[in-house]
Amino acid sequence: MIAITFPDGAKREFPVGTTSAGIAATISPRLAKEAVAAKVDGILVDLSHSLDSDASVSIITRDSPEALELIRHDAAHVMAEAVQELFPGTQVTIGPAIENGFYYDFARAEPFTPEDFARIEAKMREIIAADKPLVREVWSRTNAIEHFRFKGEAYKAEIIEDLPEDAEISIYRQGDWLDLCRGPHLPSTGKVGTAFKVMKVAGAYWRGDSRNAMLQRLYGTAWRTKAELDAYLLQMEEAEKRDHRRLGKDMDLFHFQEEAPGSVFWHPKGWSMFQGLIAYMRGRQDKAGYVEINTPEVMDKVMWETSGHWFTFREHMYTTVVEDRTYCIKPMNCPGGIQVYNKGIVSYRDLPLRIAEFGKVLRYEPSGSLHGIMRVRAFTQDDAHIFCTEAQMEDECRKVIDLIMDIYKDFGFDNVRIKFSDRPEKRIGTDETWDKLEASLKGALDHMGLAYELNPGEGAFYGPKLEFVLRDAIGRDWQCGTLQVDLNLPERFGSSYIDESGQKQRPVMLHRALFGSLERFAGILIEHYAGHLPLWLAPVQAVVATITSDADDYAEEVARALSCAGLRVELDRRNEKIGYKVREHSVKKAPIILALGKREAEGRQVALRRLGSQAQETLALDDAIRNLVEEATSPLARVAGDTYRNII
RNA sequence: GCCGAGUUAGCUCAGCUGGUAGAGCAAUCGCCUUGUAAGCGAUAGGUCGUCGGUUCAAGUCCGACACUCGGCACCA
């Protein structure tokens, strides 16, 4: 007998070999019927799974959160069967459950088209209606390989061949169709339900490697109920509405055109926001003891050979030849920054030296990777290079991390993940140097008690890096800030400082960007706020709109007063109804509309309306100005600054 | 870069199986003086992404290229 512990703490004995289905049956007939899987010592297993030792067991029904993953995984299998039935000759590869749904990668010469989706869905419904039992079988390796080879399933055979020697090869059978799969699965196809949809088709490389064949990936979504599916589809539509490319048009922030793929044409309003971000960051950096410089966009190729970019980053670099001399357009700011440091003699007393640059960099990015202002070929970094002694390195890292986290909070990003990327294959410098750099960067995180995930081999070519990934209002992750520590570039460019005993020493160089790319960060903010930018950042903070032409003079006075108080204002005296004006400015995401009619003009008042609300507030003009000025204050104002240069 | 889909007026889109383009909004002009997310009328606006081919005839069929979108790969 074995002892089974249930989630409520109850303990009961069962014969060895009892299946999880059997256990469910002893609890209640209802549970026996509703059970779809079980969790044994925290691991999800099939209902047919038999237990031969003591364990804690909970029964999973279709309503359990764990069931969702099974439903999706099974939906992938059902889709694979449907596709193979409809399109004979199609090879199956892999098909996992993913966030919000599932996919399956197929190998087929003919492309799938969106017109096929309905047929595939219909066939899937047939398979689900047939409620075929899903039966797990364990096959021998040679049997399995032979079986799939014989069926012409080369990819499946390859997967099995690559499984570890001791791996158990399990096959799941649903009627006549079967697939190699680790499982677990629902007891029958009927349990998948009908709340699913084939969403899109896309290319995907076999095993995620661009050197391999391109497969066709069919994406689907699946949920427990129709209501959940509908909610998901609605959420997708909502996400589309906050797409920064859509809002960029609506709000008249920027545009793109064919002649400059991957480069932004910033319009006045977008540029206002962009400059607002720079002003904020400049202020924060100033208060954190940074100085700011600017360096050339175009420098001789020799500079990039010295830095190592020419050998490790060349495929991303633009070059130009004039007077038989080859120049590179900068893809990074570091070599330029080092030149400023190197000009003159630096004493240990001057360190740490924090040198910032809002540098515009150009990188060739593959055409398929471009995406609005989030992924472009020309972008501005809020870059800085901190030169310090080895002893100061860890403390400087901690200061950067503190600053990053504090700045993200100003934009409402509380969920920030840190990724630690260590030495890549393509790199410069000795292993000893890399050991030292990786250790101190990790040390900074450990001493701050910050959690991080490892990202092996993803560091910059000159040093290990931290990446700061933030999650936006609708749960998407974006990599923004980075912090890299580097001893290699100072060495290559011969940087030095004079220590206490008058000896030349090599400084450490920290590369850091907090927003990362201003373009990307602006895009993230647009989507994060769904266009409802905080007042301090909004390109137009208030629109003064007249209701009748009787209020024209007063409206002009109000607009002028707001403008004099430092607010960005638009005056709308057009001959249109107030409802029309409200709609138009709301679509453009103006945060505040001040509607002025005869009543307001006579009482020297304003009727204030906020974006996203239908409420109106009538208040005295002077109060309105005072409130708005207060409300439009940059979060920069709350940060204490203590910066002066101490000449010793 | 790779796979697939798309590109028609400033914007959003229609145009079936080929017979030289259409709507709504925006724009301009006029009427309306307007009270919180689209008042009414008139006018104007397009070598249908580019280049080439098939055809008596191409927005429509075929090919190449460019760009965009969805993924993959790459990445701030």
Image (spheres, coloured by chain):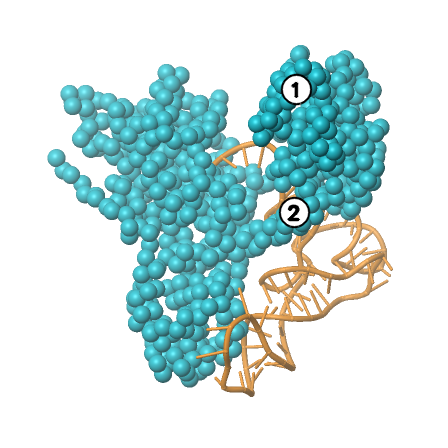
Establish if B27 lies above or below A32.
below
Q: Which residue sits at x=37%, y=64%?
A: A568
- At label 2, which amino acid type do we have? Glu
In this rendering, position of residue A393 left or right of residue A424: left
Q: Which residue sits at x=50%, y=54%?
A: A530
Establish if A453 lies above or below A15.
below
In this rendering, position of residue B8 left or right of residue A420: right
Q: Compute the Cα span from label 1 to label 2.
A: 38 Å
Judge if badges 1 and 2 mark residues of a common chain.
yes
In this orientation, which residue lies closer to the viewer: A285 or A168? A168
Q: Quadrant of residue A293?
A: top left
- Which color is chain B depicted in? orange
Q: Residue A390's spot in the image, x, y percent?
A: 27, 24
Question: Subunit of mark 2?
Answer: A
Q: Which mark is residue A13?
A: 1
- Disc 1, SS: strand
- Whether residue A94 is visible, yes or no, is no
The chain coloured cyan carries which letter? A
Disc 1 versus disc 2: nearer the observer: 1
Q: Residue A570's spot in the image, x, y percent?
A: 41, 69
- At label 1, which amino acid type do we have? Glu
For marks 1 and 2 on the same chain, the one whose residue lies earlier in the sequence: 1
Q: Which mark is residue A228?
A: 2
In this orientation, which residue lies closer to the viewer: A6 or A42? A6
**Which quadrant would the N terminus of chain A be assigned to in this image?**
top right
Question: Subunit of mark 1?
Answer: A
Q: Which residue sits at x=69%, y=30%?
A: A27
